[in-house]
Image (cartoon, rainbow, N blue to C red):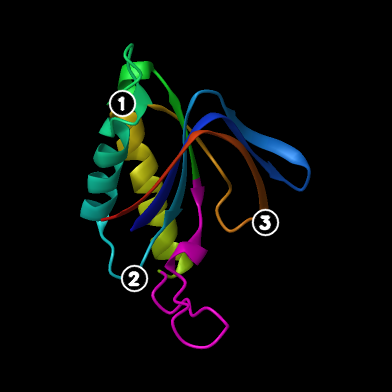
Amino acid sequence: MRAVVQRVSEASVRVQHEMISRIGNGLLVLLGVSKADSSTDAEYLAGKIVHLRIFEDADGKLNRSLLDIGGEMLVVSQFTLLGDCRKGRRPSFINAAEPARATDLYEHFIRQTRALGVCVQTGRFQALMAVSLINEGPVTLILDS
């Protein structure tokens, strides 16, 4: 699994001009599922992201996690994170999981994150989405399981 994690003051998802999800202070997670991923990968990434110390403490140091600040998470499936651009000019998505498998692991990641005590909003799997965010910092990290 690959995740792009962005610290946000707000983020939202629209599908066909309809707002379907919105969060305030927290994390926007763009999540890509590969053919090789398993439930263990989803569990690892959920725990890792929720406990990442990327929010400021009273001294301005990145020392607080999403749980510490009581923040929210918006999770958006994004198979293009698995795009391989090393050859040619058209990305290859051969390593991306098939939709049924990707859906299962995407939903497992969400369940694991909620089980850790985080309020999670989601995009809509396989929909054309408009994602908006205000990146705080900016802080953006890329994690692989």
Q: Is residue 124 left or right of residue 96?
A: right
From the viewer's side, name the closer residue of 127 and 9.
9
SS at circle 3? loop
Q: Looking at the image, is mark 1 or mark 3 earlier in the sequence?
A: 1
Q: Residue furthest top?
A: 58
| Furthest residue in direction bottom, as rendered | 88
Q: Which residue occupies 58% across, 48% down?
A: 124
Q: Is residue 24 above or below residue 40?
A: above
Dot 2 amino acid type: Lys
Which residue was labeled with disc 3? 128
Location of residue 55 (image quadrant)? top left
- As measured in the structure, the alpha-carbon distance from the residue carrying label 2 to the one carrying label 3 is 22 Å
Residue at 36 percent across and 54 percent down: it is: 105
Indicate yes or no whether the magenta region holds residue 112.
no
Q: Amino acid at mark 3?
A: Leu
Is residue 71 placed above or below 137 in the rendered structure?
Answer: above
Q: In what quadrant of the picture does the C terminus appear? A: bottom left
Residue 139, given in percent of the width and then of the height, sits at: 44, 38
Mark 2 vs mark 3: which is more N-terminal?
2
Query: Which residue position holds label 2?
Result: 35
In the picture, the disc for residue 65 is 1
Is residue 134 placed above or below 44 in the rendered structure? above
**Distance from the alpha carbon under mark 1 to that under mark 3:** 31 Å
Q: Nearer the viewer, residue 87 or 14?
A: 87
Residue neighbourhood size for the residue with mark 3, other residues' Cα within 10 Å, grouped as few (<14), some (14–19), many (≥20):
few
Q: Secondary structure at mark 1?
A: loop
Q: Which residues are magenta?
A: 76-96
